[in-house]
Image: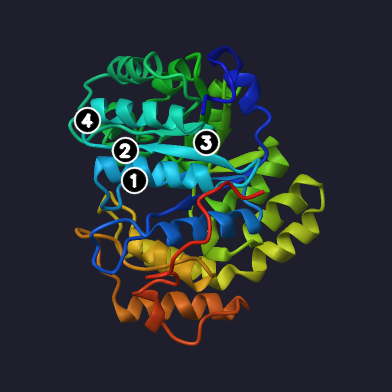
Amino acid sequence: MPLPYTRAEIKDRAREWVGLCNVTLPSFNEAFSDLNEAGIRHDVRLAHEYGYWGTLVASECGTTLEEYERFLEIVADEAPEGFRVVAHLSFDTVEDELRVAEAAEAAGAEAALLSYPPSFRPTSADEIVAHTRHVAERTDLALILFGVMTWGFKPLHPAGFPIDALAEMAKLETAAALKYEGGGAALFSAFDEAYRRCSDHVVVENPMEMHIPALVRNYGVRWFGTSGYESARDRPVRVFEAASAGRYDEAMEIFWSYHPAREAKGQFHASFAGAGLIHRVGWKYLGWLQGFNGGLLRMPQMRLNPGQMKALRAGAAASGFELPPDDTEFYRGRTAGMAFASRGRHA
């Protein structure tokens, strides 16, 4: 399937993106020897049902390169009409990233979230721009730039990612959006600078759901991603839709309705601060509480202990979500061993 756009159309196309892009994590069979295709398809359908614009097909979850390519194909095949697929270009080498970008193009993906291999250790902002340009010139995918402290670029700028580099990268022909999470304690001032310097060229947003009302109201942001919004079922979508329609009181009523879940998730994330990783098994559990497949990821992964699960469940319960009665079935997953009815695209 060819890409649904040309390189020259990317920037205008991204301005038409409206909605929230969640994250789909892979599901494995009970022996961890292969992907659980039924579980993956279940999660794609449910994300669409909850109103998400599309989904990031997450890497960094224990798949081999070949498995990730198949994971991407399964998600693209299952995606209902209008539900977008975003590839995750986070791998050991830039060659692997470009291989996956080629697979994403063949699958008709909407975009790809850019990453930087752990071996990439730039000594200047210009080197970051050059590396990013190297990728951009070798794929026709719309690229979501990712300004975050995870890459270890803080020696080059206090915000964690040189703003000068972002400003240059935003001008690249295939740069569509900037997912900006820099600044640390100065997050909003850093975001404002990134927005001022980059928004003429790309969509600029911070994906964290707690910022949605403020960024819609004060910056007119119309697209957010990528993030594990599914931990709050469809409520982030409803917040976005109400705020986008100017119904700010309604948006904030929904927003505060799941604050206990937000606080529990925030405390959970604080427990592994500095790891440079997301607790993907924890995200699988949060999604499972809201109807997604669940199941463990292939090792090595951070372990999810019963105390963490209890706290996350308590936050979701206090937010009024209907939850499974206990956690027994999380480890197996909702579709473990199930056959799926069809491999075809769902309308």
Q: Which mark is residue 90?
A: 2
Spatial CA distance of label 3 from label 1 is 26 Å
User: Quick check: 102 above or below 48?
Assistant: above
Could you tell which of marks 1 and 2 lies nearer the N-terminus? 1
Q: Amino acid at mark 1?
A: Ser
Q: Nearer the viewer, mark 3 or mark 1?
A: 1
For disc 2, the neighbor class at 10 Å (few under 14, some 14 to 19, many from 20) is many
Q: Amino acid at mark 2?
A: Ser
| Secondary structure beneath label 2 | loop
Contact flag, marks 3 and 4 (Cβ < 8 Å): no
Question: Which numbered disc, 3 or 2, marks the residue closer to the eye?
Answer: 2
Question: Alpha-carbon distance for marks 1 and 2?
Answer: 6 Å
- What residue is pinned by disc 4? 93
Name the N-terminal-most of marks 3 and 1. Answer: 1
Residue 59's label in the rendered image is: 1
Residue type pointed to by label 4: Thr
Give the SS element for disc 4: loop
Q: Nearer the viewer, residue 331 or 187?
A: 331
Q: Are marks 4 and 2 in contact (CB under 8 Å)?
A: no
Secondary structure type for disc 1: loop
Q: CB atoms at circles 4 and 1 under 8 Å apart?
A: no
Relative to 147, is 261 above or below? below
Image coordinates of residue 180 in percent, x first then y, are: 48, 37
Quadrant assignment, res 8: top right
